Image: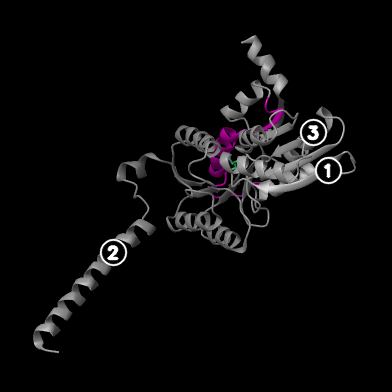
Amino acid sequence: MNNDSKFTLIVIGCVIFFISLIGMIIYGYKTFAISPLDQKAEKDYSHHFALVAEENENDYWRLVKKGAEESAEKNHVNLEYVAPKKADNDELNRLLDRMIAAKMDGIIVQGIKGQRFKDLVHKSVERDIPIVTVDTDAKASERKAYVGTNNIEAGKLLGKSLLENTSGEQYVGIITGRNEAINQQERIQGFREMVKGHKRIHIIAIRESHITKNGATIASYKLLKQYPKINAFVGMSALDGPGIVEGVKEVAPFKNTYVLAFDTLPETMQLMKAGKIDATVAQYPEQMGNDAVEVLIRLQGKDLLDNLIYTKTNIITKEDVQRQDKTQ
Ligand code: BGC
């Protein structure tokens, strides 16, 4: 190799090295940097909390966030909101770790399964950063408190509604948000406990919606194709009800299918008014966000004796919605 070629090689090597270095710096900054609070913010806020939600673009979590923000503002708390773009436990753990590294005064997070989550909660609590689980508890972790629905009881409410409002054989298709989500497992457990021993109720199959309406449409569509005798659907997460209605419309539009949903997002309420969803379990996500912030404030420097803070749940039927609509 002559000197010219050597020189060119060295120059190319240097250019590649510097481009990689700059890339690494940018990547490192984007991955690990937490937007720094300016001096004024530090002074004005009593605490700096984080809310780590299940999924960013999700109407249910927007309500949790809204409630948390209202309480944060009232209590002069600076609240950081982070969430995976699409529900993903690994990403949630990564965000939780980032919030611990950012030395928050407290963290509100959806409880999830797995050793990694437990380890992170342990690390957080060791660093005096209390953790409150919201919406879904992770009892096996060292979280300081849980704020949200009693999900086993909520599942029982679904079962009770099915028993009270149907007659004859019921072949049930269950649509669950995510198989690995603890709250979904608990709701299914509660539902099973309630219908157990009632010979006319047959749970045919359980399919995932990935907590999207489209996912619930596809899942219920496929279930109905595979098991045409299904005449009742139970949706276990917020967008499952509207998805089920679409799926049923495609495969069995003239069949009388009993549809039970979860949550009271606007589309669900409209479909109840139209008689397409028979009943839903109401949860109070804004209340959860609100209470979780209050609980974190109380947890500063001390533990709580009563650390299971269940927010309300109740069944709303299509008749309730239609009646209310008439009186308005
Ligand atoms: C659940 C949340 C879930 C949401 C999905 C709700 O019923 O409580 O955990 O993220 O549905 O949209």
Kind of residue at disc 1 = His
Kindly identify the residue that appears in the image at 80 percent across and 44 percent down.
Answer: 203
Q: Residue 202, labelled with which disc?
A: 1
Q: Residue 23, labelled with which disc?
A: 2
Position of residue 304 relative to residue 59, above or below, is below
SS for dot 1 = strand
Of badges 3 and 1, the one in the foreground is 1
Of badges 2 and 1, the one in the foreground is 1
User: According to the image, label 3 marks what residue?
Assistant: 162
Nearer-the-camera pick, 111 or 44? 111
9 in the magenta segment: no
Q: Earlier in the sequence, mark 2 or mark 3?
A: 2
Q: Position of residue 278 (x, y in %)?
A: 72, 27
Q: Position of residue 123 (x, y in %)?
A: 54, 62
Q: Position of residue 83 (x, y in %)?
A: 48, 48
Kind of residue at disc 2 = Gly
197 displayed left or right of 227: right
Nearer-the-camera pick, 50 or 261? 261
Kindly identify the residue that appears in the image at 61 percent across and 10 percent down.
Answer: 328
**Residue span colored magenta:** 276-304
Distance from Cα at disc 2 to Cα at disc 3: 57 Å
Kind of residue at disc 3 = Leu
SS for dot 3 = helix
